[in-house]
């Protein structure tokens, strides 16, 4: 077994052009550089309490993100997932039914925004061993995936907020939304 080191990567913040740049599909999933990047992204998501992180957020313009759902105060029944890398993902179907929900982002520190997302999506992706998967996701996990998928297309959740009235600071979010 190869033991690789893990690093917490520096997260690019809003204003950094890398968050707005096009991303490229990963041609060789087995490349050590790609496998190391996956390990580092998982490690960074865990250490920063993120429920997802995309490669452009650590300045790698590649089509890769990690989904790491776990229950939280707003989504008590969110599933606990092993951090799941999705490589060259494609959302192939979106439900018409949408749901509003508050989102935050490691690249937009201190802010939350109310964003409408499809409640159900179907996703096609490759895992870190190069195996293809196709699966339907709902609710919180579907939201995470749509948020991360946006990062691969140079978008952040702020672009999806309908009105600046739907923005809140983290502190207000915690006092108003989480604590009711
Ligand atoms: Zn984000």
Image (tube, rainbow, N blue to C red):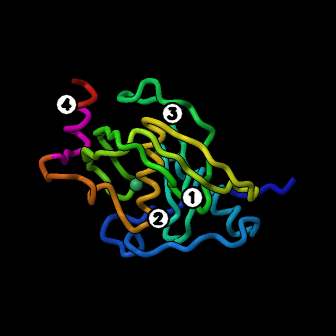
When the figure is inspected, residue 116 is found, relative to residue 128, above or below; the finding is: above
Reading the image, the residue beneath label 3 is 70
Are the two marked residues, 2 and 1, in contact with CB atoms closer than 8 angstroms? yes
Q: Residue at x 19, y 38 (%)?
A: 172
Q: Position of 128 compared to 75: left or right?
A: right
In the image, which residues are magenta?
Answer: 166-174
- Bin the neighbour count of mark 2 within 10 Å (Cα to Cα): few under 14, some 14-19, many 20 and up: many
- Bin the neighbour count of mark 3 within 10 Å (Cα to Cα): few under 14, some 14-19, many 20 and up: some
Dot 1 falls on a residue whose secondary structure is strand
Question: Alpha-carbon distance for marks 4 and 2?
Answer: 31 Å
Reading the image, the residue beneath label 4 is 176
* Depth order, front residue of 155/107: 155
When the figure is inspected, residue 52 is found, relative to residue 32, above or below; the finding is: above
Reading the image, the residue beneath label 2 is 152
Reading the image, the residue beneath label 1 is 89
Dot 2 falls on a residue whose secondary structure is helix
Coordinates of residue 35 in the picture (x, y in percent): 70, 62
Q: Position of 132 compared to 179: left or right?
A: right
Question: Alpha-carbon distance for marks 1 and 4?
Answer: 35 Å
* Depth order, front residue of 104/152: 152
When the figure is inspected, residue 70 is found, relative to residue 3, above or below; the finding is: above
């Amino acid at each position: 077994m190869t033991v690789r080191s893990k690093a917490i990567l520096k997260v690019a913040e809003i204003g950094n052009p890398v968050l707005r740049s096009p991303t490229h599909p990963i041609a060789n999933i087995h490349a050590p550089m790609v496998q190391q990047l996956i390990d580092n992204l998982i490690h960074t998501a865990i250490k920063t309490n993120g429920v997802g992180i995309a490669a452009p957020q650590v300045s790698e313009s590649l089509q890769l993100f990690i989904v790491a759902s776990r229950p939280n105060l707003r989504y008590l029944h969110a599933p606990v997932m092993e951090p799941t890398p999705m490589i060259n993902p494609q959302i192939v179907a979106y439900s018409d039914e949408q749901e509003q929900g508050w989102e935050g982002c490691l690249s937009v520190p201190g802010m939350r925004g109310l964003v409408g997302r499809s409640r159900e999506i179907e996703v096609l992706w490759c895992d870190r061993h190069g195996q293809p998967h196709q699966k339907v996701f709902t609710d919180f996990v579907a939201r995470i995936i749509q948020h991360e998928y946006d990062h691969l297309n140079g978008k952040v959740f702020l672009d999806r907020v309908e009105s600046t009235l739907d923005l809140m600071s983290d502190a207000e979010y915690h006092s108003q939304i989480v604590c009711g």
